[in-house]
Amino acid sequence: MMKRSIFAALLFAATIVACTTTSEGVNTRVSGRFVGSNIDSVYLERVSDNFSSPERIGAATLADNGAFSFEFNVEDGTSPRFYRLTFPANMRPVTLVVAPGDDIVLESAGDIFLNYRVTGSEESALIQEFNRRYFDAADRLVHAAEKLMVDVNNTADWEMEAYSAARDAIQVQVRFIGSNQDKLAAFYAMRHNVAESYIPQLSGMGINTAHRQSLLSGLKQSYPDSPYIAILEQEVSDDNT
C-alpha cells in the first residue's frame, strides 16, 4: 500500500512539474493556479528571437486545484526573452517576459486572459496591464463589427461604437508605449494594431516612426543585448525608405 502511495505521489509531481532541463543555466520557474477556466492543461512556449515562430518547451496538466508549474534553465546573463502560456482551447495566449532566475506566478479565476494576475516579473505585469485595457477596447470593436453585419436598423449607432472602440484601442496603445519607452512590454504592445485603414478618420493616430525610434533608443539603454532591437532597427529603416 505504501509503495502504491509513493508511486502516486511521484506521478502527481511529474504531472505538475512539466519541464525541467538539466543543461547549464539558471533555474527559472513559471507557475500558477487557474480555476474555473474549463481547461485541463497548459503549454509553455519560447518565442523566437525574431518574434515569429514560438517553440513549445513544456506541457502541464492542471492539478485538481488548478495548479501548474514549469521549471527550466535559462543561460545566466542573457537578456530577457518572451515566453507564452497557451491552451488547448481557442484562447488568447498569455505573454510573459522571462529573465534568468525569475520565479513568475500567475493566478486567475474564470476567463484566464481577462482575469489573470502575475507577480515576479515587472515586465510581465506591464503586459497584463496593457492586455486588460487594450483588449477591452478591441473586443468592443469586434462586437460592433459583428452587429454592423446583422443589425441593419442601427447601422449609424454601431458605426459610432466601432469608431469609439478603435479610437480607444489606439489611444491605449500609444499612451502605453509612450509611458514605457525602455520596456519590452512596449515592444509587445507595438505588435498589436487596430487597422486604421478600416476607419479612415483615425488615419495617422496610431503607431508611427517616432514611436518606434523612441522605443528603439529606450531598449538600447535598458536591454542593449536584446535580440528584439534588430527588429525595431529594421522597422525604422523600412519607415525611412
Image (cartoon, rainbow, N blue to C red):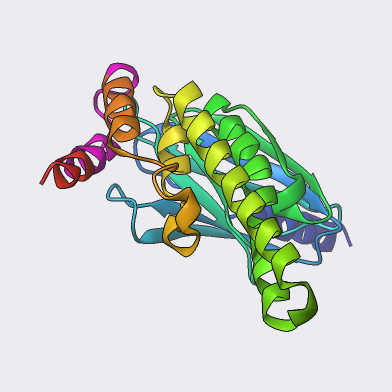
Q: Quadrant of residue 118?
A: top right
> Which of the pair 30/181 is nearer the observer?
181
Q: Quadrant of residue 92?
A: bottom right
Vertical arrangement, residue 47 with respect to residue 187, above or below: below
Q: Residue at x 48, y 64 (%)?
A: 198
Bounds of the magenta span?
Answer: 221-234
> Which of the pair 13/77 is nearer the observer?
77
Vertical arrangement, residue 31 with respect to residue 14, above or below: above
Residue 53 image point, x, y percent: 35, 61
Residue 37 image point, x, y percent: 80, 60
Asked if residue 38 is among those painted magenta in the image, a careful observer would answer no
Q: Is residue 20 visible?
A: no
Q: How many marks?
A: 0
Vertical arrangement, residue 57 with respect to residue 40, above or below: above
Q: Residue at x 46, y 52 (%)?
A: 193
Magenta segment's dominant SS is helix
> 8 left or right of 190?
right
Q: Is residue 189 visible?
A: yes
Asked if residue 233 is among those painted magenta in the image, a careful observer would answer yes
Residue 213 image point, x, y percent: 26, 29
Residue 33 image point, x, y percent: 77, 46
Q: Residue at x 33, y 58 (%)?
A: 52
> 9 left or right of 22?
right
Q: Residue at x 70, y 49 (%)?
A: 136
